[in-house]
Image (spheres, rainbow, N blue to C red):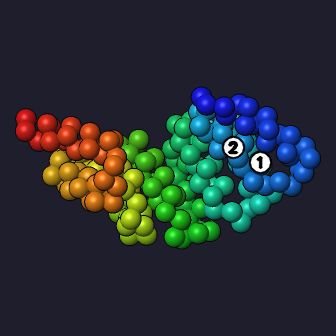
Amino acid sequence: NGRFKEAIESFKIAIEINPEFMEAIAAIGEALIKLAEFSEGLKIYNQLIERWPEYAEFYSYKGICLAGEKRFDEALVSFDDAIKLKPDFVDSYANRGSTLRQQNKLEQALTEYKQAIVLDDKNSDLYFDQSLVFSDLGQIENAINSLDIALSINKNSAEIYAQKGLLMLKERR
């Protein structure tokens, strides 16, 4: 778990010194997400939204916490709130895609990833995640094509090459 707990303690000291230190409060939330302590992270993001409702990122992180707790419908609402504040917020579309995939709403997930790619077509992670949805749908060739695009952006990703290899094995069956 890295030094996330130590980092949280350091951020707490910063907040004691300056209670309005928004970035330190948000960093605690991010550390809690990395520790998979979603209910605690949710409390942080609810506080942040109450104090600074204009930041789309806080709604997106709240959605990640809700999805982590398997509260998928609430998570989708939170991602929508982020998109309302910041319509070009790529992460919220990707997070919607991930959440919909977890619910096995694959066509909807694919739509979200496609929208994220429209907004950021140089992000290999988006193509990788899209490939997972194509694979889930049994569209192996489309999945491989997505990975080829990901590799054209990021030639040094072992994860992308491995996923492509796995799909090629699946395709041969």
Label 1: element kind: helix
**Quadrant location of the C terminus in the rendered image:** top left
| Camera-side residue of 49 and 108 | 49
- Which amino acid type corresponds to the residue marked 1 in the rendered image? Ile
Q: Quadrant of residue 138?
A: top left
**Would residue 132 be visible to someone looking at this image?**
no
**Quadrant location of the N terminus in the rendered image:** top right
Please determine whether, in this image, residue 155 is positioned above or below residue 67: below
Q: Quadrant of residue 152?
A: bottom left
Q: Quadrant of residue 16?
A: top right
Residue at position x 53%, y 42% in the image: 67
Q: Residues within 10 Å of mark 1 (few under 14, many from 20)?
A: many
Where is residue 43 shown, x and y percent of the image?
73, 41
Q: Which mark is residue 25?
A: 1
Asked if labels 2 and 1 touch by Cβ distance under 8 angstroms, the answer is yes
Q: Which mark is residue 69?
A: none
Q: Which mark is residue 29?
A: 2
| Camera-side residue of 150 and 95 | 150
Residue at position x 92%, y 47% in the image: 17
Where is residue 119 shown, x and y percent of the image?
43, 69
Label 2: element kind: helix
Residue 135 lies left or right of residue 47; in this view the side is: left
Residue 10 lies left or right of residue 91; in this view the side is: right
Residue lying farthest to the right in this orientation:
17
Where is residue 46 shown, x and y percent of the image?
73, 48
**Would residue 51 be visible to someone looking at this image?**
yes
